[in-house]
Image (tube, rainbow, N blue to C red):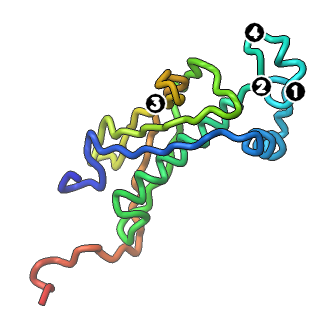
Amino acid sequence: MSEDFYVSVGDQVQFAKTVGESDVYLFAGITGDLSSNHVNEEVMQRSGYGRRIAHGALLIGFMSTTSTLMIEQSGGVGAEETPVSLGYDRIRFLAPVFIGDTVSVTYRIAEVDPARRRSRSEIEIRNQDGALVAVGQHLMKWVANPTAVPLHPPSELVR
């Protein structure tokens, strides 16, 4: 961790999960995305994929999981600042994720800007065979809390 910031370039976290049929159906129900790509096995057996694929937006949700893990690793939502997502950029879905695949998401801090209180991270998602299935970047803002109590008191106050 850099002296003036909660995260440093190179800090990383990982998250892995097997994508289950319930994940796909619950996500479809929540979002209303009931495309045959995700919920109709018969249609997808006739497709070039041969079976149903997970929603790309579900993979973005897994990216969000890793950003939360990074916040927790860096000390969580503290008294001094509250980290919030500014969004995701350059997201690409490079290969399908099928029901039953296990995906591993790696979130790595690529850049910090202490003056602007921002961090940028690179995210990679790989399947159980090591194939890169999705990539993206995440922008985080570290917002000062107006009534912040320093997490580390000045040395003259330490007894």
The residue depicted at 84 percent of the width and 44 percent of the height is 29
Q: Are marks 3 and 4 in contact (CB under 8 Å)?
A: no
CA–CA distance in space, label 4 to label 2: 11 Å
Q: Is residue 86 above or below residue 1?
A: above
Q: Which one is earlier in the sequence, the residue at label 1 or at label 2?
A: 1
Q: Are marks 1 and 4 in contact (CB under 8 Å)?
A: no
Q: Which one is earlier in the sequence, the residue at label 1 or at label 3?
A: 1
Q: Which residue is mark 2?
A: 52
Mark 1 neighbour class, 10 Å CA radius: few under 14, some 14 to 19, many 20 or more: some
Nearer-the-camera pick, 83 or 97: 97
Q: State the mark number for residue 122.
A: none
CA–CA distance in space, label 1 to label 2: 7 Å
Q: In the rendering, at what x and y percent does residue 9 appear? A: 26, 40
Q: Which residue is mark 4?
A: 48
- Secondary structure of residue under mark 4: loop
Q: In the rendering, at what x and y percent does residue 10 appear? A: 27, 39
- Secondary structure of residue under mark 3: strand
The quarter of the displayed image where residue 5 is located: bottom left
The quarter of the displayed image where residue 107 is located: top left
Q: Which numbered mark, 3 or 4, is in the foreground of this view?
A: 4
Q: Which numbered mark, 1 or 3, is in the foreground of this view?
A: 1
Q: Which residue is mark 3?
A: 124
Q: Which one is earlier in the sequence, the residue at label 3 or at label 2?
A: 2
| Amino acid type assigned to the residue bearing label 1 in the image | Asn
CA–CA distance in space, label 3 to label 4: 25 Å
The residue depicted at 52 percent of the width and 30 percent of the height is 128
Q: State the mark number for residue 40.
A: 1
